[in-house]
Image: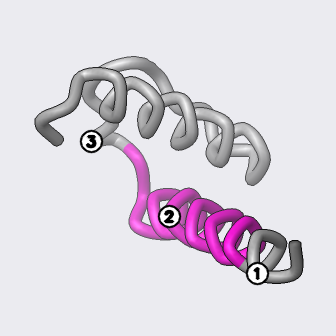
Amino acid sequence: MTVPEAKQAMEQFKMEAASEVGVALKQGYNGDLTAKQAGSIGGQMVKKMVEDYENRMKA
């Protein structure tokens, strides 16, 4: 990402999603995560983005 604010916001979003699915994510490198853990974080992020989009469509 070329916009520093966007990168920072995405990192915060990722941390929130990780917390919601119970994965302990740390700042920086997280190469010790299992594929299942990483997938659950990504899946949670997509789920929340879809929910946000659907809510905006209803408004």
Residue 15 picture quarter:
top right
The answer to whether 38 appears left or right of 5 in the picture is: right
Q: Nearer the viewer, mark 2 or mark 1?
A: 1
Q: Is residue 12 above or below residue 57?
A: above
Contact flag, marks 1 and 3 (Cβ < 8 Å):
no
Task: Specify the label residue 57 is tagged with.
Answer: 1
Q: What amino acid is labelled 1 in the image? A: Met
Viewer-nearest residue: 31 or 53:
53
**Cα distance between the residues tagged 2 and 1:** 23 Å
- How crowded is the residue under tag 1: few (<14 C-alpha within 10 Å), some, or many (20+)? few
Q: Quadrant of residue 52?
A: bottom right
Q: Which residues are magenta?
A: 33-53
Question: How many neighbours does mark 3 have within 10 angstroms: few (below 14), some (14-19), or many (20 or more)?
Answer: few
The residue at the point 57 percent across, 71 percent down is 46
Of marks 1 and 3, the one in the foreground = 1
The answer to whether residue 42 is magenta is: yes
Q: Mark 1: which secondary structure?
A: helix
Which structural element holds mark 2? helix
* Residue 58 % position (x, y): 87, 81
Which residue, given by chain and number where applicable, does mark 3 sit on?
A: 31
Say whether disc 1 or disc 3 marks the residue closer to the N-terminus: 3
Residue in the picture at 31% in, 32% down? 7
Task: Give the position of the N terminus as an image quadrant.
Answer: top left
**Residue visible at 67% across and 37% down in the picture:** 16
- Spatial distance from mark 1 to mark 3, Cα to Cα? 37 Å
